[in-house]
Image (tube, rainbow, N blue to C red):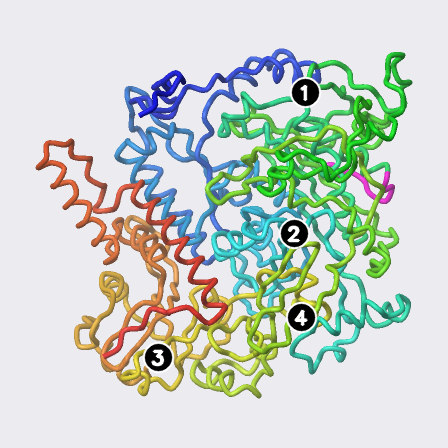
Amino acid sequence: MKKSNKAPRERTLSRNNEQGGNWNVVNQTNETFEKYYKAQEIIPEAEWDAFLQAFREPLPTTFRLTSSRPTARALNQHIKDVYVPFLTGIEYEGTKLSPPKPLEWYPNQLAWQLPVPKSALRKQENMRKFQHFLVYETDAGNLSRQEAVSMIPPLLLDVQPGHTALDMCAAPGSKSVQILEALHGHADDAKAGDAKVPQGLLIANDSDAKRCHLLVHQSLHRVPGTGMMVTNHDATQLPSLRLAKDSKTYADKLKFTQDEENRLLKRDKAKLAEEYDGLLFDRILTDVPCSGDGTIRKNLGIWGDWTPGNGIGLHALQLRILLRAIQLLKPGGRLVYSTCSMSPMENEAVVSAALHQCPEMSIVAVPDELPGLIRRPGMTSWKVLDNNLEPAPHPDAPAPADAPEPPSAEDVVPVEQDNDKQREGQHKGKGKANSKPHVKGARKTWSKTLWPAGDEKERGLEHCLRLYPHLQDTGAFFVCVLEKKADAAPAPVADDAAMKDEAKEAPSTAEKRERASSPSRPEGEPEAKKVKQDEPVPELQVESPAPAATAEKAEGKKEHVMGAGRPFNEEPYIYLPGLEDDQVKLIKDFFDISDSFPFNELLVRNAAGAPLRSIYLTSQLTRSLLLSNAYTRMRLISCGVKLFTRQESSKEAASIYRCKWRLNSEGLEVVRPYLGEKRILTVSEETLRQCMEEVSIKLEDLKEEGLEARMRAMEPGSAVLRVQNAKGKDVEVGEDMYLAFWISKSSCNLMVEKVEKSALSLRLYDEDVTPHSKAKQAASSRAASSRGASGAATPAQPVSGTATPAAAAEDSAETKVEATKEAEKEETGEASVEPAATE
């Protein structure tokens, strides 16, 4: 074997693993970083040491409860009554550990902070049990592990039920979930469960198609919403969507085709405006791609990689996103601009430039919102420094005497001759090939918008929020709340035909870094990227829709349409004809669904437009959008809530089921207010535990008196299991539970995902009693016995009969991957649904 000339990797202790490990110790110093921010005077000199030291400490664990879920109140009380006492007064390696404490500034104290080292969370017995609880409740969608400062922008957005909202750079989705929660209303609100409460509209957009799918399957399943849409666009070029003014325009429509889109593009703009309005938003979140130095406490690689140019290179992109957001904002609407960066180039400079170009916008002072949150004012002056910490040349300044002469023809390098590394970077999504020729020896140009305009105090930039780690043990963050004048003239609806040429030259956000660009990377973590320092800021633009393309005519195939210069191969969204459809009539009768249910808003995702595998429900506003715009032009990835899935059975058992559709867990809360008592089965807590302990139960084995007879009297198929006032161990407050259920001729079983079952079991019984957990424990015990017999060290046994956190995390990741693959297959009719318990 050939010997390597490289020095062996140093084996050192990790700061998160005091017992030893194989991580190199990160040098948590960067002289340029310190000098740059000292020169910017972002904090008083007296706080500098505390500020810098806070960056060298690991972040505490923070999480928040899903406020719109009925379980939120009971789960929060469970943490207070059970886990806070359980984690009080414990020690780890001679250090007293603090129990979880509520974030005092988060509404209704539904967010928590646990300031303990990760090593203690993994190894200390009580903390390990709590971590296991967090893993399962997160996977079940009842809480979100989210950095504290990341929770702030959606709160300051002040979203109300019925609003139209847009999240321009949504992945990984935790902020989108917060917005959706606000649209649904708080679970403590007595009207929150009312089916007629307006849920508004949220369009969650991201430039990366893979992250869009992860956003759907890993984040937004927690708060399913009929007004939820996920789109895949460059945030700087979001299309202007149209809404038909008269509902009769689409009353009898089931789909909006690409041919209709092409015809509208050719119509006179004035005539088009007579029939359609442009969609503007009440609330817009622009949590833009940034250099991410505010996340340095968890992304330790930034210590070695940080330069001033990281932020300067993203300034133009950030400004374009903000300007496009302003165009899409309603008069009187609110917009929040945020980054996880401290650089004024990415923050105040962007806001100041936008305010100069958009006089209808102003900064909103929010000193009384989120009481208890310690914040610092925005900057009204700053310095533009290059990577050598020298003043950058202002574009209006005269060129130096030794500046090169204007380039000759032979000095210009064509784009086609760009080097291979740049092309490779473009292919990998880490940069983009130059769109303009290189000029040898040319002076770099710096955008004038990087410099203060001089009127920042008059424009109120001090009302921006700067959040630093030493203030409340968080990451660093920048937030600015903006508002458009109520009497501002709405931005004109985009002239689609006139903008096609502009779109060809517009740079793509998809080729630039965005936060949390991979599912394994925590929110806010930046991805490696080539930073450009000489990118000019274009004038205010609006984007053209995806160019029209010829759709495949073959029935049953996807339309392969080129949108925004990229392939788009998602299945079409087609509405069902309501109760005129035989399967919809069957579902209505079988589940005893009220006549007030919006049957005309049920849709499917296949080119045939038939209920083959899944049926979704959208809101009325969503329906109007889908029937006024081609889904390919919108680059629509996901829409609405999945209510029903076709449950396949063996040929022998199929004859006993009149209705083979089952209720989906994620859509149960949406459809439940419309359900009659016909398919709802009320049982005791003891029966619920029996159902959780077994994959399926024979009807004669049910322990609850009279339950077997009640089930045999019901028609076989999907049902709802209701448990009233269910209480966890040592918890005073109970909750009513509704769970998807299946009844066959001779057996029954819960139709709930494994992780959700485990989370519910831990909350109710203080242990995981599910068969899946028991199987993993048995396998773990056999492996431990095998290692013990061979002389290897036997690992510590799990607490309260549960799997170890590592195993839980591994199982969680595996489940998510399987769920994603299954969901993708399901939409094409290839999924193999696990059969229900049958005789």
Q: Which residue matches tag 2?
A: 159
Mark in the foreground, 1 or 2: 1
| The label number, if any, that marks residue 42 in the structure image | 1
Q: Position of residue 180 (x, y in %)?
A: 58, 55
Q: Position of residue 728 (x, y in %)?
A: 31, 53
Picture residue at 86% right of the left edge, 67% below the top:
273
Mark in the foreground, 2 or 4: 4
The amino acid sitting under disc 4 is Ala
Q: Dividing the image into 4 quarters, which one contains the C terminus?
A: bottom left
- Which of the pair 703/168 is nearer the observer? 168
Of the numbered discs 2 and 4, the one sitting upstream in the chain is 2
Q: Which residue matches tag 4?
A: 551
The amino acid sitting under disc 2 is Val
- Which of the pair 796/411 is nearer the observer? 411
Measure how far apart labels 2 and 3 are at the Cα level: 40 Å
Q: Is residue 734 left or right of residue 570?
A: left
Q: Which residues are magenta?
A: 357-365
The amino acid sitting under disc 3 is Gly
Measure how far apart labels 1 and 2 are at the Cα level: 30 Å
Disc 1 to disc 2: CB gap under 8 Å: no
Q: Position of residue 365 (x, y in %)?
A: 74, 36
| The label number, if any, that marks residue 717 in the structure image | 3
* Residue sitting at the far left: 789
- Which of the pair 384/281 is nearer the observer? 384
Picture residue at 41% right of the left edge, 58% below the top:
819
Local crowd size for mark 3, using a 10 Å CA cut-off: few (<14), some (14–19), many (≥20): many
Q: Dividing the image into 4 quarters, which one contains the N terminus?
A: top left
Query: For numbered disc 3, what is the local secondary structure?
Result: strand
